[in-house]
Image: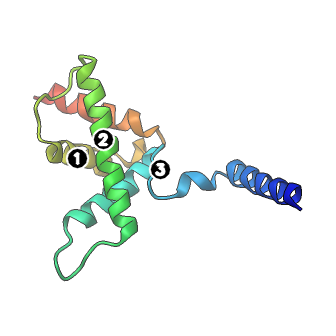
Amino acid sequence: MKRGAIVCVLGLFLVVLSTGLYAHQPGVIENGYQLRDAWEAYQRYMNADATHRPSMETSLQAGTFMGYVVAVYDSMRERGADVPNNLPYNEVFKMVGRFIDDRPDELNRRAFQIVRTALAEFARRR
């Protein structure tokens, strides 16, 4: 009985893994489409007020967006990349968000590449 349950769980895991369903859950950012969804959640989260609180999923996606962008930004600064220095994080979020909004053709790229490109382009314009 126990062995059958283990085989069943492993089989289910392999099905989920092979279909890519795991990558469509909130809290996971791998590509530009997921980054865009998280950016939109961030905007909903920031525009919420006392009468309209964001859902748990929106809060999770917004937090994931902020953490992801900060991680890429900080790692680029630590490596000496040409990125804007000493910007408040909320400005970095807006900068990346504008890039996502203005360049939907870039969404097929990996998320870290989009964040890197957005930061590098902003630094070149300064």
Disc 1 or 2, which lies upstream in sequence?
Answer: 2
Q: From what the image shows, is residue 96 above or below residue 121?
A: below
The disc labelled 2 sits on which kind of residue? Val
Disc 3 or 2, which lies upstream in sequence?
Answer: 3
Tag shown at residue 26: none
Disc 3, SS: loop
Of residues 3 and 53, the one nearer the viewer is 3
Residue drawn 33% across the image and 50% down it: 65
Q: Alpha-carbon neighbours of circle 3 within 10 Å: few (<14), some, or many (≥20)?
A: some
Q: Based on the displayed image, in which of its 4 quarters is residue 119 positioned? A: top left
Image spot of residue 67 (x, y percent)? 31, 45
Image spot of residue 63 (x, y percent)? 32, 54
Q: From what the image shows, is residue 113 above or below residue 94?
A: above
Residue drawn 16% across the image and 48% down it: 90
Q: From what the image shows, is residue 12 above or below residue 30?
A: below
Measure the C-alpha gap from mark 1 to mark 2: 7 Å
Of residues 57 and 119, the one nearer the viewer is 57
The residue to which callout 2 is attached is: 69
Q: Alpha-carbon neighbours of circle 2 within 10 Å: few (<14), some, or many (≥20)?
A: many
Q: From what the image shows, is residue 80 above or below residue 15?
A: above
